[in-house]
Image: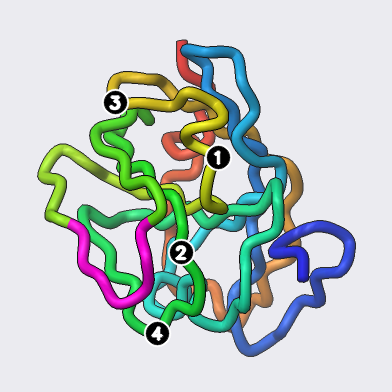
Amino acid sequence: MRLCGGEVQVNHSEPGRRCFAVRNRSRGTALAEDVRLADTPRARLVGLLTETALESGEGLWIYPTQAIHTFGLRFPIDVAFLDRSRRVKRVYHRLVPYRWTRLVWSAQSVLELPVGVLARTGTEVGDELEFSLREELPVPEENETEKHDFALLTKASE
């Protein structure tokens, strides 16, 4: 199942999904083209727990957070913790289910990807990631309770 893309149906009981393409600006490599933003308490709580796998090109960007867990997750993932400039502060390769990560004080968000993506792209601490808004599905008016500074989230790194 694609996290974003054409198959996504808007569920009017939860906010719309914002989808991003992510590339490693430092190395000129693409990490994913189908990354869903989890920026509400509910979306951060659920995360990838309803998924059975991440397909190639998919990912989840959790904002804000400084630590994650994989309790209830059914598959391992690669994880990159990012600061407010979207520089990689810590990586976890093949983080298996039922684990906690360490608290990363300097992190503002985390990018969860299929196993092997960080190694294949050479992504490591210090690299700068670039997020490009790919599409935005409508957010039902009755659910617009949280406001975010998306200019800050989607601002292209200089």
Q: Are marks 4 and 3 in contact (CB under 8 Å)?
A: no
- The residue lying at 28 percent from left, 63 percent from top is 68
Q: CA distance from mark 4 to mark 3?
A: 27 Å
- How crowded pointer 2 is (Cα within 10 Å; few <14, some 14-19, many 20+) is rated as some
Q: Are marks 3 and 1 in contact (CB under 8 Å)?
A: no
User: Residue 134, located in which quarter of the rendered image?
Assistant: top right
Tell which circle, 3 or 2, labels the residue nearer the N-terminal end: 2
Tell which circle, 3 or 1, labels the residue nearer the N-terminal end: 1
Q: Which residue is mark 2?
A: 76
Chain part drawn in magenta: 95-101
Q: CA distance from mark 3 to mark 1?
A: 14 Å
State the SS at label 3: loop
In the image, which is nearer the foreground, mark 3 or mark 1? Answer: 1
Query: Where 109 falls versus 23 (above or below)?
Result: below
Task: In the rendered structure, find residue 21 and report the number of the disc placed on it.
Answer: none
Q: Which residue is mark 4?
A: 72
Amino acid carrying label 3: it is Val
Q: Are marks 3 and 2 in contact (CB under 8 Å)?
A: no
User: Residue 131, located in which quarter of the rendered image?
Assistant: top right
In the image, which is nearer the foreground, mark 4 or mark 2? Answer: 2
Q: Are marks 2 and 1 in contact (CB under 8 Å)?
A: no
Task: In the rendered structure, find residue 125 and report the number of the disc placed on it.
Answer: 3
Amino acid carrying label 1: it is Val
Q: Is residue 49 magenta?
A: no
Q: Is residue 70 left or right of residue 141?
A: left
Q: Are marks 1 and 4 in contact (CB under 8 Å)?
A: no
Query: Where 24 falls versus 33 (above or below)?
Result: above
Task: In the rendered structure, find residue 117 and report the number of the disc placed on it.
Answer: 1
